[in-house]
Amino acid sequence: MKNDIYQRVTDKIIDPVLRIDHADEFFANMGADVCHGGNRAFYSGGSDHVQMPFFKTFRCPEAYYATLAHDLTHWTKHKCRLDREFGRKKWGDEGYAREELVAELGAAFLCADLALFPESGADHAAYVQSLAQGSKNDKRAIFSAAAQAQRAANFLNRIQGEEEKTGAAA
């Protein structure tokens, strides 16, 4: 799913001029350690950083920002932030699926807040539905995940507001 947002080797690279200023400013104010390089996007809890491929490797600007929003939503789970834990033991288990659901919904909320509309070819709704089905034992999983995602989006928006008030973004 997420791999579809990256460029193929033969595809045209997007022009950095297409960056979206208000989104760049919003994400720069997070105070998160965001490193660029490689061909995968992820949050590393051990080093507490977000790893992102370079902007130019995405199919469109919105795909870059949606991916960054997804991984910054993961970043909010750290103990010093929202301290969110779903009991993940291994990749792909129910705890993993719940956290992915929170991150995908959180990214959708942040994109809506920023008036960013991810490309129509990326089927975010199907991804959310498949993650929600992974929690078959809990009929309220989607509601719980949505509440956690909203907490994460609110947290990130609060950081933005604090930066604007203190003038630290200048």
Image (cartoon, grey):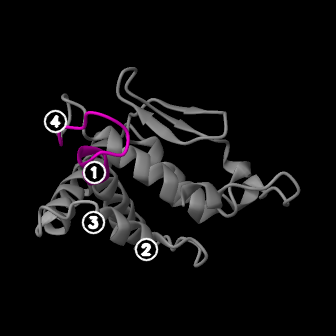
The three-letter amino acid code for the residue at tag 3 is Ala
Work out whether residue 101 can be spotted.
Answer: yes
Closer mark to the observer between disc 1 and disc 4: 4
Depth check, front residue: 169 or 150:
150
Mark-to-mark CA distance, 2 and 4: 28 Å
For label 3, the residue is: 132
Closer mark to the observer between disc 4 and disc 3: 3
**Residue 100: where, in percent of width, then height?**
34, 52
Q: Are marks 1 and 3 in contact (CB under 8 Å)?
A: no
Q: Are marks 4 and 3 in contact (CB under 8 Å)?
A: no
Which element carries disc 1, helix, strand or loop?
Answer: helix
For label 2, the residue is: 126
Q: Which residues are magenta?
A: 86-98
Which element carries disc 3, helix, strand or loop?
Answer: helix
Closer mark to the observer between disc 1 and disc 2: 2
Q: Are marks 2 and 4 in contact (CB under 8 Å)?
A: no
The three-letter amino acid code for the residue at tag 4 is Asp
Label 1 vs 4, first from the N-terminus:
4
Which element carries disc 4, helix, strand or loop?
Answer: loop
